[in-house]
Amino acid sequence: MEPDRARALEGIQRTLKGLLFTETEVFYFHLQNLGVGRDEILDKPEQFVRTIHDIFGKGSPLVEKTIISEISKELSVDPKSDLVEMIKSLRKGET
Amino acid sequence: MKSPEQMRDDSTLAFLASHAKKSKEPINPVFRHGAGVVYEIEGVDLSFERIKSYEQEKLLSAAGAKPFPACPKCSSLLLSVQLNCPDCKRQSLARSEIMIHYECEYSGPVEEFVSQKDAEYVCPKCSKTLKRVGIEYGKPGIGFKCRDCGRVFQYPLVNITCSGGHQSKLDELDLKPFPVYKVNDEIQGFADLADYFLAIQKALARSGIEVEVLARVRGQSGVVHIIPLTVRTGKMQAVVDFILNEAGSDAKVLQKILRSADLGQHVALLFVPASLVSQLAGMVNPEKIRLLAIPGNDPDAVAREVIKVVG
Ligand SMILES: [Zn+2]
Ligand SMILES: [Zn+2]
Ligand SMILES: [Zn+2]
């Protein structure tokens, strides 16, 4: 994995851990149920974001916003308004 | 007792505190198929992740280690054992008591020597009748026979395969140590929280409501959640949970939503500081999580609020 992608993944995992603390494993279980391993988040952004919506409902904008701001800080890139777009742009190396 | 907003609303810590009152035994790592290494306390599996975060907070400290065999290539602990023939290396072995005919030196499983006609043994190779143990025949003990090449032996080759498909010999396995923990005295700070939950439980029980304190409820993920209170009435079954202060309440409410999603059918009554009710209302689905303001410091008042919803 390119260093930027590795840092972005780490940033996402760290953000989730910061928000969900000891419950993070429960989130990863439901993510895995949709076929996304915790290390595959960047490869399957739609499923990742869908899991966030399914679980957090009205609370999901907070999760998404926090992750977007964390990635943009981590990689010094402009935040995008949409988490799927943000992750996809990392995949294409647009950042 | 501290007032509720001075307490930290982690029911697992309250559970650990009440456990530590009863037992000073070290907390040992155990390996669970599918879940990896967990720490079992009174039948509840706590994940290594969770235990580690408590260690970072100095609530637990390592007091030794227990090693687990691991794949030398990928560190997987999910290992399976295969027994192979030392000659042809194949796996079609049968385990049984071994018998040997001294004169012709044939050895094999006892069953091969059992004669159809009578109670005596007959050598399957030379067909002689064997009567006297220790003189004509011996039974050296349990062994293996390879169904493929016929070899009889005492010790098969032991091969280990990990979940990733790597093969190793027994002596090539790695040992991965996991800490054994002891509970530090600081954990007693959370006994107050357990007492608070207990006081609410008593008040609810006085009103004839079936209620369990620090209940263990398994979620869809398989994780066992420690719930402050679960109540059951003819009308409904609900979990009662708390966010006791404003610090980090955004993250806390996400954790409660996640927990509620994992618990499926249960309705959660989530008590939060009055100042947070309207702010958090925008984040939760009211059909799954009902937000209630904590009514002061009195556990009885909390019980009355619960009864209003479930009674
Ligand atoms: Zn392996
Ligand atoms: Zn063989
Ligand atoms: Zn013989």
Image (cartoon, coloured by chain):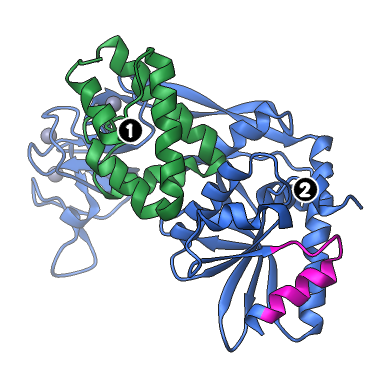
Chain colours: A green, B blue
Q: How many numbered circles are shown? A: 2
Residues rendered magenta in the picture: B293-308
CB of mark 2 near ligand 1 (< 8 Å) = no
* Residue at x 77% of width, y 69% of height: B302
Q: Nearer the viewer, residue A59 or A36?
A: A59
Question: Which three-letter amino acid code belongs to the residue tagged 1?
Answer: Ser
Q: Quadrant of ligand 2?
A: top left
Q: Position of residue A9 (x, y in %)?
A: 35, 24
Q: Position of residue B239 (x, y in %)?
A: 60, 67
Circle 1 residue: A81
Q: Nearer the viewer, residue B149 or B265?
A: B265
Q: How far apart, in angstroms, are the residues tagged by discs 2 and 1?
A: 44 Å
Q: Secondary structure at mark 2?
A: helix
B295 is within the stretch colored magenta:
yes
- Chain letter, disc 2 residue: B
Q: Which mark is residue B47?
A: none
Circle 2 residue: B17
- Give the side of residue B198 with respect to residue A14, left or right: right
Q: Secondary structure at mark 1?
A: loop
Question: Which three-letter amino acid code belongs to the residue tagged 2?
Answer: Ala
Locate residue B160: give its quadrant. top left
- Give the side of residue A21 with respect to residue B169, left or right: right
- Give the side of residue B202 with respect to residue B293, left or right: right
